[in-house]
Amino acid sequence: RAHHPGLPAVTVALTGAGTLDALRTALVAELARHGFLPEVRLTDYGSYVFELGDADSSLHTEPADVTVCVLDHTTVFDEVPLPFTAEDVADALRRKLALWRALATGFTARASGTLVLNTLPLPRNQQAQLLDLPSRAKLGAEWRRANAELLGLSYAQETPGLVVLDVDPLLGDPLELADPRFDAYAGAHLSDAFLASYARELGHLVRAVTGRAKKVLAVDLDETLWGGVLGDDGVEGIEVAHGRRGEAFHRFQGVVRQLQSQGVLLAAVTKNDRETVLAALRDHPDLRVREEDFVRVLAGWQPKPDSLRTLAAGLNLGGDSVVFADDNPAECAAVTAELPETTVVPLDGDPALHVTRLLADGWFTATAVTSEDRVRTRRYREEAARADFLSAAGSAREFLAGLGVTVRLAPATAAQIPRLAQLTLRTNQFNLTTERLSAEEVRARATGPGTGVLALTSGDRFGDNGVVGAVFLRAEGRVLHLDNMLLSCRVFARGIEQACLAAVLERARAAGYAEVRGRYRPTAKNAKVAGLYPHHGFDPLPGDGDGQEEPGAAEFAHRLDRLPEVPGHLVLDAAEDLVPAGDEPAAPADATALTT
């Protein structure tokens, strides 16, 4: 498998009923454009039933991170009699849906990674072979019903590990679904242009399932969120909703607000007087985004790259989490030159195209939107209030003592599973191994024998932080493995990690474990937790000498003798059943209450 120290590797396997070389070429380019080191494999022509259904196939023996099965109309019409009726097609669709459901269920149960199917595009040439309009209508209805059932496999989570890509929106672009010459002579049932669009959507999907969705949308204001120049035109003079241009800006505001409502952190980065900006956000009657929708408003005369650095630092996020949208080519060029890790979306020209340009690359596409996402802006605004409280405090000790931190550590509930999976995808800094997990994988670890997943929730005087961390445990005889521990950047430096380790170690000792082991795997972003285990009484373990250790990776063990204390400034509520039962438990010690 290809390796590069600065690029994440991803393996994608392509299978289907037709020739997919054009998709492979386009997908390699898309994944490279998104910063991946891609390996894209093709199975044999027309072999998708065998590949997905047989446990000895290459898709099973050489599993990929993402497996894509491209479905097209021929998979249905090849089994329709000649001549055919709309009811014949409906019968074939029912048979195929049963087959695809069985293949998807079996494959996702046996294989790791994500399986991608797609809805079926209906070529005009197929429908046009039915001459009467009622038959065409029936065919269209049955075809759409089948696509709705396919999509239902994905959104209803009937088959964990499956994503169904809706290709109908791709057909809204000016492209041909198929070239009849390549269809007839080369078995290429879908056109190169369609497959290029398909590859673009797959690029967005791969970024989402590997935890690289963007988190912040930083928007300029003048000629971006509204028309005109606020400093010259005043609050009453900017184009917000009325007139030809105003309607275009109004539509863009609605899209920005829609993204924000689903967990995207919205920030304003503008060269304007701050008080005038706040007046516009608070008082303009037609504006669709308000001050409370923004996690930060950075208004002033400093260079925009500096403002974006301030924004990322204040949110405790990397610059690669930010998408910057601006109409000014010079500002876009400056950000690209000084902050190459930050994604820039140029919005120059016609404001009617702002929405298309912002959404074209699916920067914020996510595997799921959780209840935590819908209140994310509020949580970050509460964090700003904490920062003000820290500034007013005489010391860090005084700040923590007055903050009133509460922590709850308990086995994950079913409702918390999507959020915990999201944390494995989005958390980079306090993530000891950066192992990315789907909701299905988290659920399996939470409910499987000898494994456990703990959810960490916290709050303080300023509000409830919700689920901010996770601990993944695995029993092996009298050794309890701490497979991973992760914590949201919003709650750093509050002693929460020490409280959690203290609880896990205490419960492990009470359950009769001899030691707890934890592993650290370094990445480009998690250096701040390299010393977590030694700092809390863990001793380094020697490598096994097989030469397979990753550079910088280390394993540590705690003998459960001198346990860390719960910090005195917080209140910890730790459940009694934190750790899974071991295979060879010793006589348990008396459990110590950890509610402090």
Image: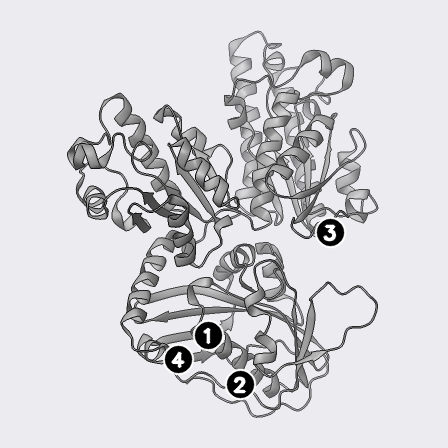
**Quadrant location, the C terminus:** bottom left
Provide the secondary structure element on which disc 2 rests: loop
Does label 3 or label 4 sit earlier along the sequence?
3
Q: Which amino acid lies under the numbered mark 1 shown in the image of this protein?
A: Ile
What's the mark number on residue 496?
Answer: 1
Local secondary structure at mark 3: helix
Return the x and y of residue 79 as percentages of the image width and height: 73, 23
Residue at 51 percent of width and 49 percent of height:
320
- Cβ atoms under marks 2 and 4 closer than 8 Å: no
The CA distance from mark 3 to mark 1 is 38 Å
- The residue that disc 4 covers is 570
Q: Camera-side residue: 466 or 587?
A: 466
Residue at image position (75%, 41%) is: 52
Which secondary structure lies at badge 1?
Answer: helix
Q: Are marks 4 and 1 in contact (CB under 8 Å)?
A: yes
Earlier sequence position, callout 2 versus callout 3: 3
- Distance between mark 3 and mark 4 Cα atoms: 44 Å
The Cα atoms of the two marked residues, 2 and 3, are separated by 41 Å
The percent coordinates of residue 264 (x first, y second) are 41, 47
Q: Are marks 3 and 1 in contact (CB under 8 Å)?
A: no
Circle 3 packing at 10 Å, graded few (<14), some (14-19), many (20+), is few
Which residue corresponds to the image point at 37% horizontal and 75% vertical from the top-left?
Answer: 405
Q: Which amino acid does label 4 sit on?
A: Leu
Which label was assigned to residue 110?
3
Q: Quadrant of residue 324?
A: top left
Identify residue type, mark 2. Answer: Pro
Q: What residue type is labelled 3?
A: Arg
The answer to whether residue 335 is visible is: yes
Q: How many marks?
A: 4
Q: Mark 2 points at which residue?
A: 564
